[in-house]
Image: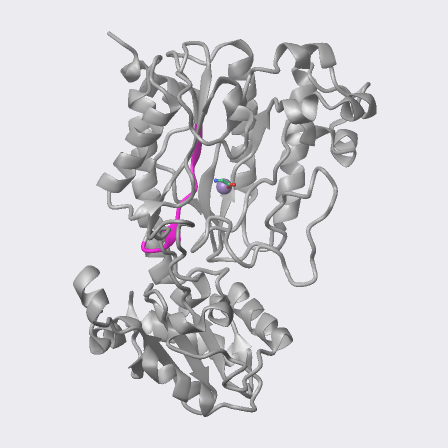
Amino acid sequence: MDPEQLRARRARIESAWGGLRGPVVIPSGLPVPVEGTDQFHDFHAHNEHYYLAGTQLTGSVLAFDPREGWTLFAPVADEDERIWTGDSEPLDAIAGRAALERVRGTAALRGWLEAHRGEPLALLGSTDILHHPAGYAMPSLRTLELEVDGERSSRLAAVIAEARRAKDGDELAKMREAARQSVAGHLLALRTARAGMTERRLQVELEAEFFRHGAARTAYGSIVGTGPNGAVLHFSPTQRELRDGDIVLIDAAGEHEGYAADVTRTFPVGPRFTGIQRDLYELVLATQERAIAKARPGKEYRELHLEAAEQIAAGLVDLGILRGAPQDLVERDAHALFFPHGLGHMLGLATHDAGGCLAGRAPSDRFGLKWLRADLPLQPGYVVTIEPGIYFVRAILEDPARRERYRDDVAWERVDELLDFGGIRIEDDVLITPDGAEVLTAALPKSAAAIEALRQEAQPA
Ligand code: GLY
Ligand code: MN
């Protein structure tokens, strides 16, 4: 990580925190055991820790003292650890990577905290230090006569979430790389998915391509759904085979040095979209392209979502699936019967990144808005996904109460014919620039013609 940018990041946070009194600790987290075994889940350092320390070490603590500045406490391997998992990184090497003057072994954390006895302690990052202090070579905070100030901790964490919205150069370089790796995986899937292949096999090929292009891991659980499975928003791939005539929805991406991409494409198993598949694909694509064209500094993300909802409602009216005036349908959440999620979300260290809602804005409980994960005016440097979709979800469409409520708004006999259709989603990662937006995943085709050209390559000779 670029040392200057890391220092600048910490300086920005320090000044946004204002005249602090008392210490702040930001643990990275401890490895999470797989219950009942001696194994551990894949380790993810807490993003607040990684954002400010630039390191992903287990059981380390970034600490801030308003009088002396930042110190990183990092674990030093004991003999057993050296035998089984290897040496720990030397503290001076960690200091170089973290661009910090003070890096000490975790054994020194206890003394550092004792020196702050009686002061209000802010705890950010992982809270596992409260339950497993021994993992940080410490007795409990209570034993040390320290108490966490919850209100202050939340206030300081909110400052970090806000700072993480606009990505700096180092972050954008990593996100561009994650996007490149992800595009490569999707291209491979578009070129090679064939009837008879299982969802799981396609997942394996796609992920292998992310890794071959340098991804450290997948940014989230890959979603590969064919036929009706495409309607399950976060579907886990199964042994179901791809069948000619079905469509496949793939929502999957790589993670690069902690930064996520998030990409969805939907394509036919055969060489072409047919009938209603093509109509709905063109509608989702036009909605996505218009939302991207309107994304610019100052634009409220919620407005983008509502405009997309209205465009989908209008398209479904034209296709004879909804009935009525698009604006009224959206006000009554009828569009959400087919587009039940938000237009997208902030993207960065997490797939659904921090800082999505402006302070004071709470998620709505309206069916058409409750999954809107971003509600803020866009600003340069923000990276958001734009991912409209249309699905035939049995859990929604077979609900008798909804059938009654939307009796006159929906052509239910047409819907009944489409209950096994699945779903279509098209998702790109969009960087807001000073005068508009740049699509970080633009190298991945999405016009129906371009998708079909790639699908030709995949067909058996
Ligand atoms: N990629 C999954 C999601 O955005 O929820
Ligand atoms: Mn997404």
* Residue 439 sits inside the magenta stretch: no
Q: Which residue lies furthest to the front in this view?
A: 36
Q: Where is residue 90 in the image (x, y as percent from the top left)?
A: 20, 74
Q: Nearer the viewer, residue 315 or 263?
A: 263
Rendering quarter of residue 52: bottom left
The magenta-colored residue range is: 257-265
Rendering quarter of residue 286: top right
- Residue 281, visible in the rendered structure: no
Depicted 126 relative to depicted 418: above or below: below
Q: Nearer the viewer, residue 356 or 88?
A: 88
Report the label total.
0
Q: Where is residue 309 in the image (x, y as percent from the top left)?
A: 66, 34
Q: In this view, does 69 lie to the left or right of 96?
A: right
* Residue 259 sits inside the magenta stretch: yes
- Residue 415, visible in the rendered structure: yes
| Residue drawn where x is 46% and y is 89% of the image | 114
Depicted 333 relative to depicted 296: above or below: above
Depicted 340 relative to depicted 354: above or below: above
| Residue drawn where x is 31% and y is 74% of the image | 74
Rendering quarter of residue 369: top right
Colour scheme in use? one colour
| Residue drawn where x is 69% and y is 57% of the image | 361
Q: Is residue 85 left or right of residue 7?
A: left
Depicted 28 relative to depicted 232: above or below: below
Q: Position of residue 294 (x, y in %)?
A: 56, 43
The C terminus - image quarter: top left
The N terminus - image quarter: bottom left
Q: Position of residue 228 (x, y in %)?
A: 53, 19
Q: Which of 217 and 287 is in front in this view?
A: 217
